[in-house]
């Protein structure tokens, strides 16, 4: 009965319109906007119901990273369902990460590093991890792009196009409202670029990426010419 109630509430969240229209490149999950970041790292929108979670577990996913603010209690419901299905509490990470109106970079930096380390720890221990925000487009793209840069030293421009824009980040999803697009460009993109600077600085100075480096409260300053290079065009996945 409890599972049915949680399942109903998750479905209600989907029926409210919070479903990605972006196509998946990793179809095995059955979850919209699902993609492999690496062999053991899967990204997507939030699981819609109990069946989605069962599918992920059957695919070998042991770790879940929820990268969003729990505004409607849906995160609490998802965590309860994961635990009911036998997922270890220590393998469930929830970070209250915002997608708009970011006024203080420090906590965003700290949560981003926590997320990167969570994914890295799973990979280093040969565990499979699934991470998501709500629809798997903006915050999820932000994190996937940074992980590719951090873990594989991918070029920032390639990462931005392939992991963010092509998977629905801001205007990469042409169905996204311009009010949402502009809020993402104002907050999340400067956060992404500032984090890339921090990652590259640690790599250059041969330091470990650590939350101790999150000392600034403001984004780095980027010229309009630079910001112009980080505006999404329509995803190549949409024909």
Image (cartoon, grey):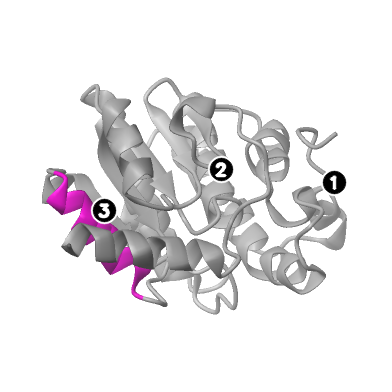
Estimate the x, y position of residue 54 in percent, counting from the top left.
29, 38
Frontmost residue, 238 versus 149? 238
Q: Which of labels 1 and 2 is toward the front?
A: 2
Separation of residues labelled 2 and 3 (CA atoms):
21 Å
Estimate the x, y position of residue 32 in percent, counting from the top left.
56, 43
Q: Label 3 near label 2: C-beta < 8 Å?
A: no
Separation of residues labelled 1 and 2 (CA atoms):
20 Å
Rendered residue at 49%/35% (across/down):
30
Rendered residue at 12%/43% (across/down):
86
> Which residue position is annotated with label 2?
32
Position of 47 with respect to 162 (left or right) is left
Helix, strand or loop: magenta stretch = helix
Specify which label sits upstream in the sequence, 1 or 3: 3
> Which residue position is annotated with label 1?
233
Quadrant, the C terminus: top right
> Which residue position is annotated with label 3?
93
Separation of residues labelled 1 and 3 (CA atoms):
32 Å
Position of 59 with respect to 101 (left or right) is left
Specify which label sits upstream in the sequence, 2 or 3: 2
74 lies above or below 7:
below
The residue range painted magenta reads 73-85
Q: Residues within 10 Å of mark 1 (few under 14, many from 20)?
A: some
Position of 110 with respect to 35 (left or right) is left
Q: Give SS at disc 3.
A: strand
Rendered residue at 43%/69% (across/down):
106
Specify which label sits upstream in the sequence, 1 or 2: 2
């Amino acid at each position: 009965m409890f599972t049915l109630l949680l399942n109903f509430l998750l479905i209600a969240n989907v029926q409210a319109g919070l479903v990605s229209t972006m196509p998946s490149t990793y179809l095995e999950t059955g979850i919209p906007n699902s993609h492999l970041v690496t062999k053991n790292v899967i990204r997507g929108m939030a699981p819609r119901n109990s069946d989605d979670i069962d599918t992920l577990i059957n695919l070998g996913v042991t770790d879940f990273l929820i990268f969003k603010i729990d505004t409607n209690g849906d995160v609490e419901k998802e965590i309860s369902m994961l635990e009911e299905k036998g997922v270890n509490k220590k393998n469930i990470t929830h970070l209250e990460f915002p997608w708009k109106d970011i006024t203080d970079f420090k906590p965003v930096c700290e949560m981003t590093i926590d997320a990167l380390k969570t994914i890295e720890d799973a990979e280093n221990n040969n565990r499979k991890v699934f991470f998501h925000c709500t629809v798997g487009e903006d915050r999820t793209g932000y994190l996937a792009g940074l992980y590719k840069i951090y873990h594989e030293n991918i070029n920032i421009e390639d990462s931005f196009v392939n992991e963010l824009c092509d998977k629905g980040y801001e205007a990469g999803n042409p169905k996204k409202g311009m009010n949402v697009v502009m809020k993402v460009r104002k907050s999340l993109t400067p956060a992404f670029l500032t984090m890339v600077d921090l990652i590259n600085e640690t790599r250059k100075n041969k330091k470990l990426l650590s939350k101790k480096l999150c000392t600034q409260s403001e984004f780095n300053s980027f010229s309009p010419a630079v910001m112009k290079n980080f505006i999404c065009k329509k995803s190549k996945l949409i024909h």
